[in-house]
């Protein structure tokens, strides 16, 4: 392996580890909510599935986005895909 390829491999490995560490910052409930949002479910649908209020779903969504520095629902879906939260 050339030094250039070794450097790129190490960088890629480091980035993957960082992504895994970042996704573990979410609680199990937050991961469930992100997954359901990424699957296109509404707050009301998620509330029904998780047996919580839609207001609680919105609160979780707000906190997740704030904590991760995400500005839109589309970015949240991208985050879910990037971190393997969607399990289809």
Image (spheres, helix red, strand yellow):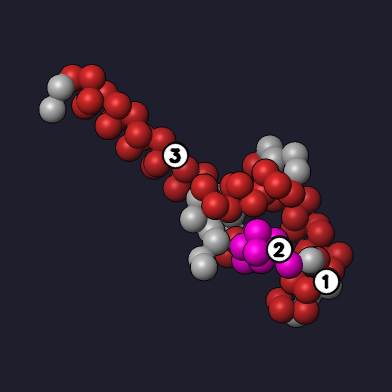
Q: Quadrant of residue 14?
A: top left
Secondary structure beneath dot 2 equals loop
Count residues near mark 2 (Cα–Cα under 10 Å), then give few for <14, some for 14-19, many for 20+.
few
* Place of residue 4 in the rendered image (x, y in percent of width and height, measured from the top left): 23, 19
Q: Which residue in the structure is indicated by mark 1?
A: 44
Q: Quadrant of residue 17?
A: top left
Q: Which residues are magenta?
A: 32-41
Q: Which mark is residue 40?
A: 2
Q: Which mark is residue 18?
A: 3
Secondary structure beneath dot 3 equals helix
The numbered mark, 3 or 2, whose residue comes first in the sequence reads 3
* Residue at image point 35% right, 34% down: 12
* Place of residue 41 in the rendered image (x, y in percent of width and height, measured from the top left): 73, 67
Count residues near mark 3 (Cα–Cα under 10 Å), then give few for <14, some for 14-19, many for 20+.
few
Front residue (pair 30, 1) = 1
Picture layout, residue 88 above or below residue 26: below
Check the image and name the residue furthest to the right.
55
Depth check, mark 2 against mark 1: the one in front is: 2
Q: Which mark is residue 80?
A: none
Drawn side of residue 1 relative to residue 75, left or right? left
* Residue at image point 26% right, 23% down: 7
| Disc 1 to disc 3, C-alpha distance | 33 Å
Asked whether residue 39 appears in the rendered view, the answer is: yes
* Place of residue 37 in the rendered image (x, y in percent of width and height, measured from the top left): 70, 61
Depth check, mark 1 against mark 3: the one in front is: 1
Q: Quadrant of the N terminus?
A: top left
């Amino acid at each position: 392996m050339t030094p250039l390829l070794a450097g790129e491999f190490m960088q890629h490995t480091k980035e993957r580890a960082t992504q895994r560490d970042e996704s573990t910052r979410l609680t199990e409930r937050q991961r469930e909510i992100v997954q359901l949002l990424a699957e296109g479910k509404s707050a009301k649908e998620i509330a029904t599935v998780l047996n919580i209020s839609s207001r609680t779903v919105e609160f979780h969504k707000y906190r997740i986005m704030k904590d991760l520095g995400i500005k839109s629902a589309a970015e949240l879906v991208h985050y879910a895909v990037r971190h393997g939260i969607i399990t289809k």
